[in-house]
Image (cartoon, rainbow, N blue to C red):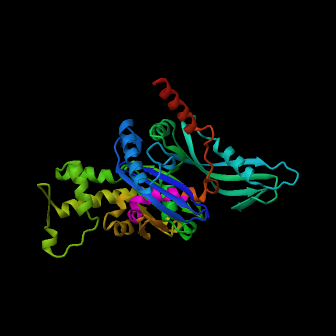
């Protein structure tokens, strides 16, 4: 069976992860190349230095290409940042054919109607995700294709991004010759890599805690319920360590990753008084852990506040799934359980074959999830306006200026 090549680029605040893979068309992924590079020029998901972002993406892509042995031409891209917003909306269309049979094109039409409302001109629609359909008053329809009816209603979850933010990121990719197959909200992509069908059905919250932002996605009854992006994440922890212990930011980041523990276990007085030394700087292990614990506790409480109901234990009985690099902090699941009284686990990508050792990490959940999103097909998950959309517009403008500059 012929295998189709696909690719994903997770454009994060602290790292860029490019994955090149192929699929057999039945959902199985084979990883062919992985390229991870430090990220520069991004702040909380926003492009602040075009050239630095472009160089970081190029470095990540080239590393993946060397391993895979062929050139990457297009990829699915992750999107996050403070400019992300979401809203629930409805759409309705009439089925006017003589047989009154709902077809696939009717689904696309009703999603386009839902996605065209309540979206300001300075916003770019990323996703219009169907939550449930209604046919002639029959509610709770999951897939109306093939059913008879005159009126088709849909309840959707619309996710939008700031137009200029999307334009800047798109331009960075096009400038190095990468076409965009689609843009996916980072926590939605992460959910594809780490959630089970049972968790989606029962109710679960995914918190993708990266370097600059924390992406949130709440699932219930096997559909998306709520999404948001918080402008706090791992970098704030490192910043607090830097200020509180008098270290440079880079050293604070290094010591957080090397020694950090959200709920340290003390084995006698010697452990409590342990001193950590790195690059000529000595700090207290307990002071380091206490700073991390306070900031992580604050972050987890902000995540819980995003839940639409105060009795969240009944709303998301499957609990909290943590992904992103910050999820690697030892003790974070224990602290999460103490705060939320919910089941808490670390979300690690699964069902991977090929050169995938480096991807079995919560920090890679978004990039892996982008591949799963591609395999499942966006038509089964959301409607995205691409034809004549922002990518083609920016592509035309960028190529025009390139020609003028020659």
* Quadrant including the N terminus: bottom right
Horizontally, residue 249 falls left or right of residue 123, namely left
Q: Position of residue 82 (x, y in %)?
A: 44, 44
* Residue shown at the point (82%, 56%) measured from the top left: 101
- Which picture quadrant has residue 266? bottom left
Up/down of 313 relative to 134, above or below: below
Left or right, residue 336 beside residue 76: left
Residue 224 in sight here:
no
**How many numbered discs, if any?**
0
Q: Residue at x 41, y 41 (%)?
A: 46
> Seen in the image, is 30 located left or right of residue 334?
right
Judge whether residue 267 can be spotted in this image.
yes
Q: Residue at x 28, y 61 (%)?
A: 293
Residue 329 belongs to the span the image colors magenta: no
Residue 25 as seen in the image, left or right of residue 171: right
Place of residue 48 in the rendered image (x, y in percent of width and height, measured from the top left): 37, 37
The magenta stretch is 357-372
Is residue 370 one of those drawn in magenta?
A: yes
From the viewer's side, name the closer residue of 180 and 223. 180
Q: Residue furthest bottom?
A: 268
Is residue 50 or residue 265 the one in the foreground?
A: 50
Q: Give the residue displayed 18% in from the left and 50% down from the top.
A: 247
* Rendered view: 260 above or below 8: below
Question: What secondary structure predominates along the stretch shown in magenta?
Answer: helix
- Residue 300 or 173: which is nearer the viewer? 173
Q: Position of residue 57 (x, y in %)?
A: 40, 45
Relative image position of residue 198 (x, y in whole percent): 56, 71
């Amino acid at each position: 069976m012929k295998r189709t090549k696909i690719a994903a680029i997770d454009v994060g605040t602290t790292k860029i992860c490019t994955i090149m893979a192929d699929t057999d068309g039945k959902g199985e992924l084979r990883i062919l190349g992985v390229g991870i590079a430090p990220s520069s020029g991004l702040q909380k998901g926003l492009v602040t230095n075009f050239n630095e972002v472009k160089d970081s993406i190029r470095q990540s892509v080239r590393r993946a290409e060397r391993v895979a042995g062929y050139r990457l031409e297009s990829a699915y891209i992750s999107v996050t940042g403070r400019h992300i917003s979401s809203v629930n909306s409805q759409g309705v269309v009439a089925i006017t054919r003589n047989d009154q049979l709902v077809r696939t094109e009717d689904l696309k039409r009703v999603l386009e109607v839902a996605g065209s409302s309540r979206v300001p001109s300075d916003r770019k629609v990323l996703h219009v995700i169907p939550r449930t359909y209604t046919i002639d008053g029959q509610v709770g329809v999951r897939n109306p294709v093939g059913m008879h009816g005159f009126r088709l209603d849909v309840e959707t979850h619309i996710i939008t991004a700031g137009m200029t933010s999307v334009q800047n990121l798109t331009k960075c990719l096009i400038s190095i010759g990468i076409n965009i197959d689609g843009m996916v909200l980072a926590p939605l992509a992460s959910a594809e890599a780490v959630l089970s069908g049972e968790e989606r059905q029962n109710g679960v919250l995914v918190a993708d805690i990266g370097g600059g932002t924390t992406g949130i996605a709440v699932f219930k009854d096997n559909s998306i319920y709520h999404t948001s992006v918080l402008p706090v994440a791992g970098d704030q922890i490192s910043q607090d360590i830097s200020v509180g212990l008098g270290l440079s930011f880079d050293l604070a980041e290094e010591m957080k990753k090397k020694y950090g523990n959200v709920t340290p276990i003390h084995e006698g007085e010697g452990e409590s008084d342990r001193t950590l030394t790195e690059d000529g700087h000595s700090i207290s292990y307990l002071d380091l852990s206490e700073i991390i614990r306070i900031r992580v506790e604050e972050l987890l409480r902000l995540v819980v506040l995003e839940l639409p109901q105060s009795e969240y234990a009944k709303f998301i009985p499957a609990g909290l799934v943590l992904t992103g690099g910050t999820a690697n902090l030892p003790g974070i699941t224990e602290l999460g359980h103490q705060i939320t009284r919910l089941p808490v686990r670390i979300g690690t990508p699964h069902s991977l074959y090929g050169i995938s050792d480096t991807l079995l990490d919560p920090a890679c959940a978004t990039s892996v999830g982008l591949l799963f999103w591609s395999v499942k097909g966006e038509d089964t998950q959301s409607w995205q306006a691409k034809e004549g959309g922002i990518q083609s517009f920016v592509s035309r403008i960028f190529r025009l200026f390139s020609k003028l500059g020659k």
